[in-house]
């Protein structure tokens, strides 16, 4: 790949974010919690508004909580003080590990304008049936986002890793559940004692993909009237 083609790729990979994220400065003495208002993000850096003043020309270790925590070393290549003690800064990523790079790329994929249709922030309780071994369990799960490739959930207990888990998911109480095979890609405890879990779907058949795409479109556009009530376990048995 030529230098020019790499630059064109980099321009394509930059996205507008305009959201506030928690972060932690891992500095040499005491870690410092902060918030970063990220305006745009690419695989090589980001532009942020914050009340922090970044040391010029120095590498700063930073744990950034995007969809999940990412450890980075950043350097301010420029910054400007704003009225009220705020700063706007252009931060360059230094020596990004392969794992962190993949997390950034996955975030860009999920949130880039051309891929908005494939993922939606849901924050709803969905009724699911999960099968692990010979045991089947039905429960309500708080779903943070969902796409045609997976979903992020909050659950009271961790899920088994490195195994394929069959799920039946009731997206809408008046339609049959969809059936997917999912695998835990990451999970971690939060401050409430619950677990935030990333699930990746095995390739879906055409009918399930269409159901999910229609559901996501309805959630994004609001074209389907809001359900009269949330789905319940009894709905799961009835459809």
Image (tube, rainbow, N blue to C red):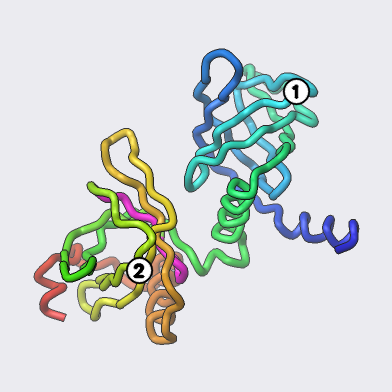
Residue 58 - label: 1
Residue at image x 63%, y 31%?
A: 49
Which stretch did the figure color magenta?
Answer: 146-155
- Which secondary structure type mostly characterizes the magenta part of the structure? strand
Residue 221 among magenta residues: no
Where residue 144 sits: x, y (%)?
A: 37, 54
Q: Circle 2: is it few (<14), some (14-19), or many (20+) Cα within 10 Å?
A: some
102, 191: nearer the viewer:
102
Q: Quadrant of the C terminus?
A: bottom left
- N-terminal of the pair, mark 1 or mark 2, is 1
Relative placement, left or right, of 90 versus 34 is right
Q: Quadrant of the N terminus?
A: bottom right
Residue at image x 67%, y 19%?
A: 53
Residue at image x 52%, y 25%?
A: 34
Q: CA distance from mark 1 to mark 2?
A: 44 Å
Residue 153 among magenta residues: yes
Secondary element at tag 1: loop
Relative placement, left or right, of 7 versus 83 is right
Where residue 28 sits: x, y (%)?
A: 60, 16
- Rendering quarter of residue 159: bottom left
Where residue 207 sits: x, y (%)?
A: 39, 86
Residue 84 - label: none
117, 179: nearer the viewer:
179
- Residue on which the image places disc 2: 164
- Rendering quarter of residue 160: bottom left
């Amino acid at each position: 790949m030529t230098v020019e083609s790499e630059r064109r790729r980099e321009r394509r990979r930059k996205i507008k974010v305009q959201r506030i994220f928690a972060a932690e400065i891992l500095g040499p003495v005491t870690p410092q919690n902060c918030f970063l208002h990220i305006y745009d993000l690419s695989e090589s850096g980001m532009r942020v508004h914050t009340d922090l003043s970044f040391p010029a020309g120095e590498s700063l270790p930073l744990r950034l909580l995007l969809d999940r925590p990412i450890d980075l070393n950043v350097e301010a290549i420029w910054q400007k003080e704003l009225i009220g003690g705020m700063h706007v800064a252009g931060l360059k990523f230094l020596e990004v590990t392969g794992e962190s790079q993949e997390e950034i790329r996955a975030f860009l994929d999920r949130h880039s304008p051309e891929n908005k249709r494939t993922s939606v922030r849901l924050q709803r309780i969905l009724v699911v049936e999960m099968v692990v071994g010979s045991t089947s369990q039905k429960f309500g799960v708080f779903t943070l986002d969902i796409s045609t490739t997976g979903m992020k959930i909050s659950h009271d207990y961790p899920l088994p890793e490195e195994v394929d888990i069959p799920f039946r998911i009731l997206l809408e109480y008046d339609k049959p559940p969809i059936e997917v095979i999912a695998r835990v890609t990451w999970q971690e405890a939060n401050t409430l004692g619950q677990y935030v879990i990333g699930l990746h779907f095995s390739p879906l058949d055409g009918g399930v993909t269409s159901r999910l795409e229609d559901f996501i479109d309805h959630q994004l556009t609001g074209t389907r009237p809001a359900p009269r009530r949330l789905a319940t376990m009894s709905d799961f048995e009835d459809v």
